Image (cartoon, helix red, strand yellow):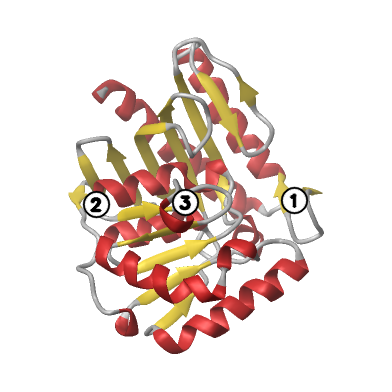
């Protein structure tokens, strides 16, 4: 397990170095996906190829699920879940909040049923490394981290994100409008992986969002859990594309009660 984790963290660090170097050279948009604002860059694809090629060389029996189209069924029971650049719009605009996110999970590549065992989120712009092993705790640049102590919602700094569809963003903004008077403030950083890493390290008290994909949450969710936090879906269901909330357990309960009448699971 230690060797696998070292491999995963090394891959994430090398991928982040590549992403940052390509950002310095200039960004080329390769395509739009679900909408004009949902973009993929040539660097996204190049970084994913680097990670996939190295996994295939070192672990040919493992499965791989990557944001940019990689889907390989394995025979070992383990799957690598990769987001080569989480926060691609930040990357495009050279906003220093974009990350490589890699997780290794047991079971089918489905966040409602898998069991994450190793994870790393590397802020490519800053070089910060957030990592966790199942049962081994979470670390930031080698130092153990914990979620912030639970505080009342009224003094909690809460992160969230918006989808790519314009109508969905409008509905999500309405949820934020309904919540913002009950918390300290809202942050929209633009990278779910970093939002979750920031909850794990105490930079945010909580984070919630609807519409995350498996690669958005796989690594960050393990970071939060291993840092002593709770990661949940709507009404106690497992976190999924439908909804995710991460926070210290007591704060998670209070925020869920505040969010319930706003129905963020329906936006």
Q: Could you tell me which quadrant the C terminus lies in?
A: bottom right
Q: Percent position (x, y) of residue 98?
A: 52, 56
Residue at 67% x, 37% y is 68
* For the residues bearing labels 1 and 2, Cβ distance under 8 angstroms: no
- Residue under label 3: 124
Which residue is nearer to you in this view: 137 or 178?
Answer: 178
Residue 212 image position (x, y, % from top left): 57, 52
Secondary structure beneath dot 1 equals: loop
Q: Nearer the viewer, mark 2 or mark 3?
A: 2
Would residue 238 appear left or right of 209 to someone viewing this image?
left
The one of 69 and 128 positioned closer to us in this rendering:
69
- What is the CA distance from the residue labelled 1 to the residue labelled 3? 17 Å
Task: Look at the picture and state if 239 lies above or below 70.
Answer: below
Residue 173 found in image quarter:
bottom right
**Percent position (x, y) of residue 245?**
43, 60
Q: Mark 3 falls on what kind of element?
A: loop
At a point 52% along the width and 47% down the height, the residue shown is 240
Of residues 248 and 56, the one nearer the viewer is: 248
Crowdedness of circle 1 by 10 Å Cα count: few (<14), some, many (20+)? some
Q: Give the residue furthest to the bottom.
A: 181
Q: Earlier in the sequence, mark 2 or mark 3?
A: 3
């Amino acid at each position: 397990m230690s060797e696998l984790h070292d491999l995963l963290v090394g891959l994430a660090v090398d991928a982040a170095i590549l992403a940052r170097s390509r950002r310095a050279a200039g960004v080329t948009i390769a395509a739009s996906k679900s909408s004009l604002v949902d973009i993929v860059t040539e660097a996204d694809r190049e970084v994913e190829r680097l990670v996939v090629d190295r996994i295939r060389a070192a672990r040919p029996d493992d499965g791989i699920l990557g944001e940019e189209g990689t889907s390989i069924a394995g025979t070992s029971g383990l799957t690598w879940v990769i987001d080569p650049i989480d926060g691609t719009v930040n990357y495009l605009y050279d906003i220093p909040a974009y990350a490589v996110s890699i997780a290794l999970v047991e079971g089918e590549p489905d966040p409602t049923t898998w069991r994450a065992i190793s994870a790393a989120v590397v802020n490519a712009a800053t070089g910060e490394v957030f990592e966790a092993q199942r049962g081994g705790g979470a670390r930031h640049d080698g130092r153990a981290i914990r979620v912030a102590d639970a505080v009342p919602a009224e003094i909690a700094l809460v992160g969230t994100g918006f989808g790519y569809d314009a109508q969905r963003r409008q509905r999500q903004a309405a949820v934020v409008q309904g919540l913002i008077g009950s918390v300290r403030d809202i942050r929209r950083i633009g990278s779910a992986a970093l939002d979750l890493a920031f909850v794990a390290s105490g930079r945010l008290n909580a984070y919630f969002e609807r519409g995350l994909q498996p690669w958005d949450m796989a690594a960050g969710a393990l970071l939060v859990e291993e840092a002593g936090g709770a990661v949940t879906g709507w009404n106690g269901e497992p976190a999924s594309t439908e909804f995710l909330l991460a926070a210290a357990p007591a704060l998670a309960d209070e925020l869920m009660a505040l969010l319930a009448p706003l129905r963020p699971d329906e936006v």
